[in-house]
């Protein structure tokens, strides 16, 4: 059985909500550290904090490119 941590996002200030995933990660780290190690912690924490900064700045952009071979019958059809 896995243990889940919940954060009441409604009670957090706007700037705090972007950092909530990092707070949850830190709370779970004691259980995870033997399996993943410090290098994983530093990389994942860096990713979470960069994501928080991107959301806060409202300057982030997400692009998706789909590459297909010309021979593909019918080409690519986006499902929306």
Image (cartoon, helix red, strand yellow):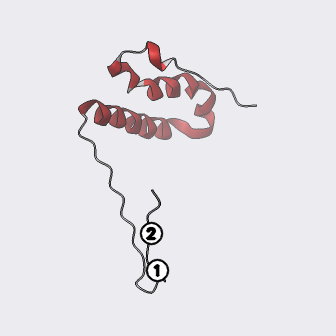
Of residues 43 and 56, the one nearer the viewer is: 56
Task: Classify residue 2 as left or right of residue 45.
Answer: right
User: Crowding near pointer 2: few (<14 within 10 Å), some, many (20+)?
Assistant: few
Rendering coords of residue 36 (x, y %): 57, 39
27 versus 80 height, above or below: above
Per the image, the residue denoted by label 1 is 74
Q: Residue furthest bottom?
A: 71
1 versus 10 height, above or below: below
Q: Which mark is residue 64?
A: none
Give the residue at x 41% y 35%: 48
Q: Quadrant of the N terminus?
A: top right
Q: Quadrant of residue 69?
A: bottom left
Of residues 42 and 53, the one nearer the viewer is: 53
Task: Classify residue 33 as left or right of residue 59.
Answer: right
Numbered disc 1: secondary structure: loop
Q: CA distance from mark 1 to mark 2?
A: 8 Å
Numbered disc 2: secondary structure: loop
Rendering coords of residue 57 (x, y %): 24, 33
Q: Quadrant of residue 17?
A: top left
Q: Residue furthest top?
A: 11
Rendering coords of residue 72 (x, y %): 47, 82
Q: Quadrant of the C terminus?
A: bottom left
71 versus 56 height, above or below: below
Give the residue at x 39% y 72%: 67
Q: Tally the numbered discs.
A: 2
23 versus 48 height, above or below: above
Per the image, the residue denoted by label 2 is 77
Could you tell me if the residues under marks 1 and 2 are in contact, i.e. CB atoms within 8 Å? yes
Task: Classify residue 28 as left or right of residue 23.
Answer: right
Rendering coords of residue 45 (x, y %): 42, 34
Give the residue at x 42% y 40%: 43
Q: Quadrant of residue 18?
A: top left
């Amino acid at each position: 059985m896995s243990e889940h941590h919940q954060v009441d996002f409604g009670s957090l200030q706007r700037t705090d909500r972007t950092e909530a995933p990092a707070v949850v990660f830190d709370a779970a780290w004691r259980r995870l550290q033997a399996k993943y190690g410090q290098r994983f912690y530093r990389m994942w924490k860096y990713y979470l904090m960069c994501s928080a900064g991107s959301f806060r700045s409202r300057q982030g952009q997400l692009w998706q490119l789909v590459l297909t071979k010309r021979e593909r019958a019918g080409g690519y059809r986006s499902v929306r």
